[in-house]
Image (cartoon, coloured by chain):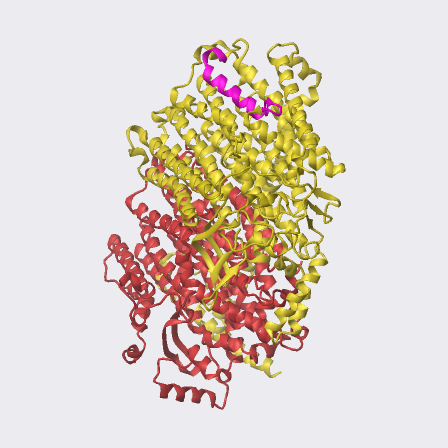
Chain colours: A yellow, B red
């Protein structure tokens, strides 16, 4: 089986299936069965088809590229390998990279591309274009694919979770099958809103959402990523604002989209920096025909930034160097303007010198940070995390989808995908943002009482973990956590949805004792909680979170060891692990244990129908086993490792913006000393967190009220979510609105005043003119100038010949100008 | 004479008929043939006329729809001027009846005829002086088509003025409460632009001399018709080149060839210390940017839009604003490249200021239609920026592709905005026809009341928001991406606009379409769309999707012509501009563009 044609075909179909479902429901939704009931079946069938196709693709992938254990060649004997893979001149730009010794264990030379550099094999990947959006003069924007192990894995994860959520939602959304009375909306006449159900519309948006997300995953270039990035944004707008009659819902939807656009602003800058300097947004190399029809290899971003000829060492691309040296280029070109070819050669000869002077590094940094800005928006990182908790206004299945495998995952995925282009400076920025995010979000989650908001902040916090992991060099660790988190977070959200479905409230203070009435939900949610805190028996076995979180801790510790001044990042991670354990078990204890706090709620509570419980069971199993590696090496961790971008994973250091920064090699974190410390730290912090939560909310040794009272200012600060919303409102929203008012006012008060003044004088002059006409020129042309102010405002005037006057006026004016200018102008030319 | 010409100029009858049919029907309507009170008949005649004109334009521009290309019809994918019609008009001043189509004008002609049909259909609710309304409406269509088709500068100017008058009356008579103010304002602004343009036209005319052009260029510029017999052609060329006195020309193509030649008289001749090309560029630019419009000469637009009836707003936003961009692209840059290069910062700066300022102003509006009007200012700013990003300078080794991308993006943005803004104004008009107010604070709940309408309207507004998959996205992205190479600061400002755009559009959608219930007066009049309204809205929405999903449908036509022009100007920069010995002698701002790109 030829993977290079099979994989794009299978995944392309998997990508398009939800689009078909979207279009069908858009036009025929309400006619699909009673009240559009069958729309759910269609959407579910579509995403299930995607899942099957993705699994097939995964099968094809594995049969072509067997997943084997990664032997950390150099790691066991503690030495960084040095097999001479570093290309010539690799150190010229100040970026040093030890060739990743262990990585040669992949054993797979690249199939999709031509030969890479010696000694540093490319990961297997396939890329190509389906469809061209714009093409001119060597610049191409297109829709295409980039498929490697990560793409295949993400397809399976996204479609699997989406399928579970579709099934679950067809039960959860059943209220929408008949007329709905929305108790959260009170009309002007004092009644609650009564409206027809919108069952098909929900699945329509869900399908479009899946299509957009899969588009990001399969994207072969950044332009395509940006396109689907925006589409994901608008889908989230539809879904968060699903109850659009509620002002809070439509506001939350707008907030989500606009805050994301703030991130996209940065992303656009990144795209411009890349496009302007390099003229391509493709990840991989492309073979295109030049003017004469001969095929030429046009390098993509990855090989421009990590040239195979330099052993995939991070290199500032020629285009960026030349762009920053534009003044020098201009000088060379001007002197040699007569011979463009010679000038180009002269410029090319100078590029190496400019590069060694550090030119172009700033552009590469801007590009990386810019793209990361987009990820900050989508993945709800500090300072743009404010939209995510508000997004809870959408129906719970949407929250589950948004928070696990789609949308927020997109940001982390893009950082992972774009990893080869990120310089150590950018990585450090990412790590710091991740650390800040994980800490702020975890502290807010401590005091939240809305069950979905706790989970929302927990998502923000976990995303912070992933970003931090990527930033400190843990490429595989971060993406591994993305996958495991997708499973247990969707599980947790669906469980919370099941609880809300039963209790008709989000407030945990009104729950309690639900373990008896909803055992399936309670136990599956416990599995989710254990997974998210990374529970496991150290060094033996654990839930999926155990493996991914340990990897992050280990890498953060390794980073802290390499950068003694920046060790606080590890403290943030360890502290975050403690907080996570506390607030997750606080949630579980408050909801399921103890005695019911609100009898009305307790009487009403019941276990959810099978259609909702079954997805919970599937996800619970996955939340446990997703991290396991089978004997022989098959497992998600090794699958991800297969996709490791060429040249990454080794030590990277930089003296550019952050002096002395060293990004440690990822395999070093598997070294015994680091690994053991990390695992024990994770175990200790998680246990402490659970015990504290149990002491406060289960055994009731410590009164939560007492603790809150003890730290009143802190509690208030956290309960008000660090006052971030208020701060943004004062610092950004209000000034923007004021500026808008100013712009609008300036039009009326300044520009229009001037125009009115001109009009007024024209009228005066016209009046004088008219007077001269009437009394001096004696009716030569009747009221010629008056026309500019009075003419033809009513039809009868128009019919009595004003139109003719008007035309006459213009014609005369034209002739007069003609004569005047030609006369003056000839004089001027002569003079 | 026309019969003889038609034998050699197959495009004569189709183009002439398309151009003057609306005017003929207008003349017919203005005669007292149709009795009073037969308004319905008048409406159908006008709609039929616009439909015939649209079919004619489609027959000329998209021959594949009619089973293959015949002589005189347009072939997509070619860069050169096609379907040229050339007849003498006022020989004393070398003024010609010179029409033609290329990749730049063809899509705009189609847009004009298409929107005219929709606007005529949208004119049904007009009940005041119906006959006079349609007379002016049809005259307006002739004027607009003439501007896009005319290749003789004088002819161009005549049509430009022909357009002005009907518009003035259409706003001034059929407008809202402050129609007189709005009409006068529109008139004053546009007249100012026209006067400056006329001065520039005459300057260029009297400086030009076609004798300096090579025989190939004389043919390419249609100074000598390439349709002539070879012998007659050689004779005509010889006659021109051996003429004793300078031969001035209004031929836009010839003026461009002269302007880009190494010994361009526009660069050497000076008026009051300015080179002709710089001064003419500036004067023409002012004339055109008033039409675009850019800040600070934009304030006629919100007033004109708010007061104009819905179909006139559609035409105004959909077509008239494009005339400015078209003029800059067709006339300013090719004829006055020196002025264009030295004033590129002005063009781009105006574009970015309009984008940001328009977006902010839109955010503050309380009137729905005024908000849409300001969104036009903002969106047309992209056109200016895209046209102006002259990044083909020494520092980039004269790479022309980024600038070409900007210009292609600007062209796309013009067409996309033609669809989306006409659609947005129509959608506002639909609501206004029902509830007779436009106050953004007094809507809400329209989604529940008029679901089909709201779905279509939100789609069109999303196109304005620049959502991928809809027409607004491609142009904005191409322009924004291209601007970085010219100026990073401007690029960042232009990227910033996406935030404000999202804010004002989403906020408006929230206030009008979302929410639980309608808050304003006349709520009982919120009826679903009529068949007629659907027939207008659906094509607009469909086109918005087609352009967004298949931008190549436009680029296939546009790109060859645009690329050729930009490549020629890049070559001019290298071979003419930078090869000139004394750069600084050509004015204090002459070199800003080539160094301004550097951070």
- Image quadrant holding the C terminus of chain B, namely bottom right
Give coordinates of residue A490: x percent, y percent: 49, 28
Vertical relation: B311 (above or below) A604: below
- B49 and A793: which is toward the camera: B49
Query: Is A585 situated left or right of A66 in this image?
Result: right
The prevailing secondary structure element of the residues shown in magenta is: helix
The answer to whether residue A536 is magenta is yes
Considering only vertical position in the picture, is B421 above or below A36?
below
How many discs mark residues in the rendered view? 0
Q: Quadrant of residue A344?
A: bottom right
B583 within the magenta span: no
Residue at image position (61%, 9%) is: A699
Q: Residue at x 62, y 18 (%)?
A: A690
Q: In the rendered view, does A787 fall on the left or right side of A547?
A: left
Residue in view at x 53 percent, y 13 percent: A512
Q: Nearer the viewer, residue B381 or B459?
A: B459
| Residue B26 appears in the rendering | no
The x, y position of residue A763, in whole percent, is: 52, 61
Up-down relation of residue B94 to residue B474 (above or below): below
Which residues are drawn in magenta? A514-540
Question: Observer-nearest residue: A421 or B292?
Answer: A421
Where is residue B137? Give x, y as percent. Answer: 35, 59
Task: Name the spot of residue A745 as percent of width and height, x first.
Answer: 58, 47
Give the camera-side residue of B410 and B484. Answer: B484
User: Would residue B520 appear left or right of A763 to someone viewing this image?
Assistant: left
Who's the residue at 57% across and 24% down the image?
A541
Q: Quadrant of the N terminus of chain B?
A: bottom left
Q: Is residue A131 visible?
A: yes
């Amino acid at each position: 089986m030829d993977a290079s044609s099979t994989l794009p075909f299978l995944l392309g179909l998997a990508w398009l299936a939800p689009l078909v479902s979207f279009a069908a429901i858009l036009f025929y939704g309400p006619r699909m069965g009673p009240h559009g009931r069958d729309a759910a079946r269609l959407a579910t069938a579509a995403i299930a088809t995607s899942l099957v196709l993705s699994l097939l693709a995964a099968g094809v992938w594995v049969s072509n590229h067997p997943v084997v254990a990664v032997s950390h060649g150099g790691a066991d004997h503690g030495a960084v390998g040095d097999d001479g893979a570093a290309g010539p001149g690799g150190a010229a730009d100040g970026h040093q990279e030890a060739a990743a010794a262990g990585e040669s264990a992949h054993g797979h030379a690249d199939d999709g591309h031509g030969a890479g550099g010696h000694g540093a094999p490319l990961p297997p990947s396939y890329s190509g274009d389906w469809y061209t959006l714009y093409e001119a003069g060597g610049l191409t924007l297109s829709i295409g694919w980039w498929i490697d192990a990560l793409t295949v894995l993400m397809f399976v994860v996204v479609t699997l979770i989406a399928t579970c959520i579709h099934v679950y939602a067809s039960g959860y959304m059943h209220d929408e099958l008949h007329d709905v009375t929305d108790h959260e909306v009170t009309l002007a006449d004092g009644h609650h809103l009564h409206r027809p159900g919108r069952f098909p519309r929900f699945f329509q948006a869900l399908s479009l959402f899946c299509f957009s997300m899969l588009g990001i995953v399969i994207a072969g270039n950044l332009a395509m990523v940006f396109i689907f990035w925006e589409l994901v944004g608008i889908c989230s707008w539809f879904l968060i604002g699903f109850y659009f009659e509620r002002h809070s819902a439509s506001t939350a939807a707008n907030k989500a989209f606009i805050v994301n656009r703030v991130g996209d602003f940065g992303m656009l800058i990144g795209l411009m920096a890349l496009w302007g300097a390099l003229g391509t947004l493709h990840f991989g190399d492309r073979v295109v025909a030049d003017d004469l029809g001969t095929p030429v290899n046009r390098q993509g971003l990855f090989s421009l930034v990590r040239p195979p000829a330099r052993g995939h060492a991070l290199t500032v691309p020629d285009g960026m160097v030349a762009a920053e040296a534009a003044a020098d280029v201009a000088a060379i070109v001007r002197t040699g303007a007569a011979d463009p070819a010679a000038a180009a050669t002269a410029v090319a000869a100078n590029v190496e010198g400019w590069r060694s002077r550090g030119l172009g590094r700033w552009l590469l940094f801007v590009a990386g940070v810019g793209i990361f800005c987009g990820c900050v928006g989508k993945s709800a990182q500090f300072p743009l995390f404010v939209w995510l908790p508000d997004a809870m206004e959408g129906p719970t299945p949407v929250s589950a989808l948004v928070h696990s495998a789609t949308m927020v995952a997109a940001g982390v995925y893009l950082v992972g995908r774009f990893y080869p282009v990120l310089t150590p400076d950018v990585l450090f920025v990412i790590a710091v943002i991740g650390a800040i995010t994980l800490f702020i979000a975890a502290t807010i989650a401590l005091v939240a009482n809305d069950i979905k908001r706790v989970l929302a902040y927990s998502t923000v916090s976990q995303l912070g973990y992933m970003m931090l992991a990527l930033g400190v060099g843990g490429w595989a660790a971060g993406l591994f956590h993305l996958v495991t988190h997708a499973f247990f977070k969707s599980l947790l959200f669906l469980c919370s949805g099941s609880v809300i479905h039963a209790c008709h409230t989000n407030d945990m203070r009104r729950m309690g004792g639900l373990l008896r009435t909803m055992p399936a939900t309670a136990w599956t949610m416990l599995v989710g909680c254990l997974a998210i805190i990374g529970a496991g028996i150290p060094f033996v076995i654990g839930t999926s979170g155990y493996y991914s979180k340990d990897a992050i801790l280990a890498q953060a510790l390794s980073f802290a060891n390499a950068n003694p001044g920046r060790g606080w990042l590890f403290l943030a991670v360890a502290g975050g692990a403690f907080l996570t354990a506390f607030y997750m078990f606080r949630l579980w204890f408050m909801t399921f244990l103890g005695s019911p706090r609100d009898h009305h709620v307790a009487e009403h509570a019941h276990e959810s129908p099978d259609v909702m419980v079954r997805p919970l069971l599937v996800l619970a199993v996955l939340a446990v086993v997703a991290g396991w590696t089978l004997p022989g090496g098959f497992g998600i961790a090794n699958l991800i490792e297969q996709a490791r971008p060429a040249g990454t994973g080794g030590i990277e250091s930089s003296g550019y913006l952050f002096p002395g920064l060293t990004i440690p090699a990822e395999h070093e974190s598997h070294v015994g000393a680091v690994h053991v410390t990390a695992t024990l730290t994770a175990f200790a912090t998680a246990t402490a967190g659970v015990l504290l939560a149990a002491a406060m909310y289960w055994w009731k040794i410590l009164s939560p009220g007492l603790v809150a009272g003890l730290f009143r200012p802190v509690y208030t600060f956290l309960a008000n979510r660090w006052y971030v919303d208020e701060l943004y409102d004062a610092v950004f929203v209000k000034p923007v609105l004021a500026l808008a008012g100013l712009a609008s006012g300036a039009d009326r008060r300044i520009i229009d005043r001037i125009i009115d003044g001109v009009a007024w004088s024209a009228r005066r002059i016209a009046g004088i003119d008219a007077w001269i006409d009437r009394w001096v020129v004696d009716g030569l042309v009747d009221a010629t100038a008056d026309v500019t102010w009075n003419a033809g405002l009513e039809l009868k005037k128009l019919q009595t010949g004003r139109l003719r006057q008007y035309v006459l006026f213009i014609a005369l004016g034209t002739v007069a100008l003609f004569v005047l200018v030609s006369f003056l102008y000839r004089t001027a030319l002569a003079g | 004479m026309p019969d003889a010409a038609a034998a050699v100029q197959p495009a004569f009858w189709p183009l002439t008929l398309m151009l003057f049919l609306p005017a003929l029907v207008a003349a017919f309507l203005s005669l007292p043939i149709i009795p009073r009170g037969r308004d319905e008949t008048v409406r159908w005649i006008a709609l039929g006329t616009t439909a015939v004109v649209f079919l004619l334009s489609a027959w000329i521009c998209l021959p594949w729809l009619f089973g293959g290309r015949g002589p005189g019809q347009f072939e997509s994918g070619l860069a050169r001027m096609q379907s040229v019609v050339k007849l003498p008009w006022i020989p004393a001043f070398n003024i010609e009846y010179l029409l033609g189509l290329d990749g730049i004008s063809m899509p705009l002609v189609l847009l004009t005829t298409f929107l005219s049909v929709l606007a005529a259909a949208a004119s049904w609710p007009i009940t005041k002086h119906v006959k006079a309304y349609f007379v002016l409406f049809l005259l307006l269509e002739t004027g607009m088509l003439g501007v896009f088709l005319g290749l003789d500068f004088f002819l161009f100017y005549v049509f430009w003025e022909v357009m002005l008058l009907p518009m003035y009356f259409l706003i001034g008579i059929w407008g809202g409460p402050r129609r007189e103010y709005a009409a006068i304002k529109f008139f004053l602004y546009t007249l100012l632009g026209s006067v400056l343009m006329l001065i520039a036209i005459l300057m260029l005319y009297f400086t030009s001399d076609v004798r300096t052009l090579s025989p190939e260029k004389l043919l390419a510029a249609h100074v000598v018709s390439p349709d002539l017999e070879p012998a007659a052609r050689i004779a005509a060329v010889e006659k021109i080149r051996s003429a004793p006195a300078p031969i001035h020309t209004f031929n836009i193509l010839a003026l461009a060839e002269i302007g880009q030649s190494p010994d361009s008289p526009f660069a050497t001749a000076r008026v009051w210390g300015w080179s002709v090309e710089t001064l003419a560029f500036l004067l023409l630019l002012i004339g055109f940017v008033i039409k675009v419009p850019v800040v600070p000469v934009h304030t006629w637009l919100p007033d004109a839009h708010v007061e104009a009836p819905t179909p006139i707003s559609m035409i105004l936003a959909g077509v008239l604003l494009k005339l400015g961009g078209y003029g800059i692209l067709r006339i300013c840059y090719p004829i006055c490249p020196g002025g264009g290069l030295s004033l590129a910062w002005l063009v781009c700066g105006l574009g970015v200021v309009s984008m940001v300022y328009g977006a902010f102003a839109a955010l503050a509006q309380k009137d729905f239609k005024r908000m849409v009007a300001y969104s036009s200012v903002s969106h047309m700013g992209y056109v200016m920026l895209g046209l102006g990003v002259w990044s083909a300078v020494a520092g980039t080794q004269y790479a022309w592709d980024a600038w070409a991308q900007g210009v292609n993006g600007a062209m796309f943005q013009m067409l996309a905005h033609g669809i989306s803004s006409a659609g947005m104004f129509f959608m506002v008009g639909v609501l206004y026809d029902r509830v007779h107010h436009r106050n953004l604070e007094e809507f809400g709940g329209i989604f529940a009341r008029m679901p089909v309408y709201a779905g279509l309207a939100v789609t069109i507004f999303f196109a304005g928001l620049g959502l991928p998959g809809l027409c607004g996205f491609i142009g904005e992205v191409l322009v924004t991406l291209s601007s970085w190479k010219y100026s990073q600061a401007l690029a960042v400002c232009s990227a910033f606009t996406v935030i404000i755009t999202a804010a004002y559009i989403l906020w408006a959608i929230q206030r009008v379409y979302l929410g639980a219930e309608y808050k304003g007066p006349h709520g009982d009049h919120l009826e679903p769309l009529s068949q007629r309204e659907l027939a207008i809205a659906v094509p607009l929405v469909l086109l918005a999707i087609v352009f967004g999903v298949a931008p190549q449908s436009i680029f296939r036509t546009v790109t060859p012509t645009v690329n050729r022009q930009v490549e020629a100007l890049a070559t001019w920069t290298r071979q003419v501009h930078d090869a000139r010995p004394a750069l600084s002698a050509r004015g204090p701002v002459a070199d800003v563009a080539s160094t301004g790109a550097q951070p």
